[in-house]
Image: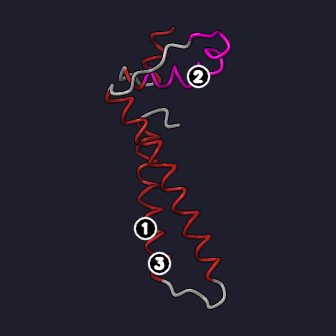
């Protein structure tokens, strides 16, 4: 989960690096009889790109205010989800980690 703007920028740069890596991988000829290696490499990079894009999209939705954050109804769920909910609320309110820390004392 992306927790702040710095991580957001870094994640976006990693997406670009992985996409460039995928392009380079596709430019090299496959070794005969070892097509499975190339397929595995390609699938691994594609999965990493997809995972990072999902995280970026979630962060962007939260930051834009388009995501309604759920109100936990059970104490156990609230404790389990508290860290990620706090991060999401901070992002949605446009606060930095430092600003939230100052508000909380």
The Cα atoms of the two marked residues, 2 and 3, are separated by 40 Å
Does 3 appear above or below 28?
above
Q: Residue at x 38, y 26 (%)?
A: 67
Q: CA distance from mark 3 to mark 1?
A: 10 Å
Label 1 neighbour load within 10 Å: few <14, some 14-19, many 20+: few
- Read off the magenta span: 73-90
Indicate which label's residue lies in the foreground, 2 or 3: 3
Q: Earlier in the sequence, mark 3 or mark 1?
A: 1
Specify whether residue 2 is painted magenta.
no
Q: Position of residue 18 (x, y in %)?
A: 48, 62
Task: State if disc 3 and disc 2 touch (CB < 8 Å).
Answer: no
Dividing the picture into quadrants, the one containing residue 41 is: bottom right
Q: Position of residue 24 (x, y in %)?
A: 46, 76
- Residue shown at 54% from the left, 56% from the top: 48
Q: How many marks?
A: 3
Q: Is residue 81 above or below residue 11?
A: above
Between disc 3 and disc 1, the foreground one is 3
- For numbered disc 2, what is the local secondary structure? helix
Badge 3 local density, few (<14 within 10 Å), some, or many (20+)? Answer: few
Is 55 located above or below residue 77 in the figure?
below
Q: Residue at x 54, y 69 (%)?
A: 42
């Amino acid at each position: 989960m992306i927790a702040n703007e710095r991580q957001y920028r870094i994640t976006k740069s990693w997406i670009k690096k992985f996409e460039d890596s995928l392009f380079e991988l596709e430019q090299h000829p496959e070794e005969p009889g070892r097509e499975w290696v190339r397929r595995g490499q390609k699938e691994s990079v594609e999965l990493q790109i997809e995972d990072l894009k999902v995280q970026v999209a979630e962060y962007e939705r939260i930051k834009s205010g388009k995501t309604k954050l759920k109100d936990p109804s059970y104490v156990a769920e609230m404790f389990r989800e508290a860290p990620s909910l706090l991060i999401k609320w901070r992002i949605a309110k446009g606060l930095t980690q430092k600003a939230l820390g100052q508000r909380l004392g």
